[in-house]
Image (tube, rainbow, N blue to C red):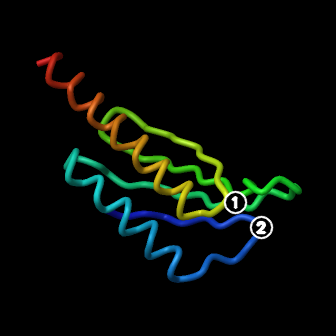
């Protein structure tokens, strides 16, 4: 899957980008018609410990799935986001089956 990365307020490390790519590639197992995705990694200027924001947009034919997660680390927020997208993809896939 083609993923475009956008890091806001910081410069993302190659290890982090590879981690995101690896996690998002696993979504192909649940739905194989994924067009592409965008991953926005942001560091919010706050004193709160959970200042890492991950927003993932996934495009499938006829729909765009979006999830936003906050976390203490990008890895944790990405894990939560990918899990939420996995559930959304399964719901979307079931919905398509009932329409046919």
| Horizontal side of residue 93 vs 16, given as left or right | left
Q: Identify the mark nearer the N-term, 1 or 2.
A: 2
Q: Looking at the image, which residue is at 44% across and 76% down?
A: 18
Q: Pick out the residue farthest to the bottom.
A: 14
Q: Pick out the residue farthest to the top.
A: 99
Secondary element at image label 1: strand
Q: Residue 33 bears which disc, if any?
A: none
| Horizontal side of residue 90 vs 99, given as left or right | right
Neighbours of disc 2 within 10 Å: few (<14), some (14-19), many (20+): few
Q: Looking at the image, which residue is at 43% across and 41% down?
A: 84
Q: Do the residues labelled 1 and 2 touch (CB within 8 Å)?
A: yes
Looking at the picture, tell me which residue is in the foreground, 36 or 29.
29
**Residue 86 pos. (x, y %):** 34, 43
Quadrant assignment for the N terminus:
bottom left
**Residue 45 pos. (x, y %):** 86, 58
| Horizontal side of residue 64 vs 53, given as left or right | left
**Residue 39 pos. (x, y %):** 53, 58
Q: In this view, does 24 lie above or below 19?
A: above
Q: In this view, does 5 lie above or below 96?
A: below
Separation of residues labelled 1 and 2 (CA atoms): 6 Å
Q: Looking at the image, which residue is at 74% across and 73% down?
A: 10
Query: Mark 2 highlights which residue?
Result: 9
Secondary element at image label 2: loop
| Horizontal side of residue 38 vs 12, given as left or right | left
Quadrant assignment for the C terminus:
top left
Q: Looking at the image, which residue is at 37% across and 59% down?
A: 24
Query: Mark 1 highlights which residue?
Result: 42
Neighbours of disc 1 within 10 Å: few (<14), some (14-19), many (20+): many
Question: How many numbered badges does the structure rendering display?
Answer: 2
């Amino acid at each position: 899957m083609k993923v475009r990365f956008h890091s806001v307020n910081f410069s993302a490390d190659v290890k982090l980008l590879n981690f995101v790519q690896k996690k998002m590639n696993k979504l192909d197992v649940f739905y194989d018609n994924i067009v592409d995705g965008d991953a926005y990694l942001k560091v919010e200027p706050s004193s709160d410990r959970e200042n890492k924001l991950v927003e993932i947009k996934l495009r499938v034919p006829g729909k765009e799935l979006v999830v936003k997660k906050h976390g203490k680390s990008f890895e944790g927020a990405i894990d939560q986001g990918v899990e939420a997208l996995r559930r959304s993809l399964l719901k979307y896939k079931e919905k398509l089956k009932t329409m046919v």
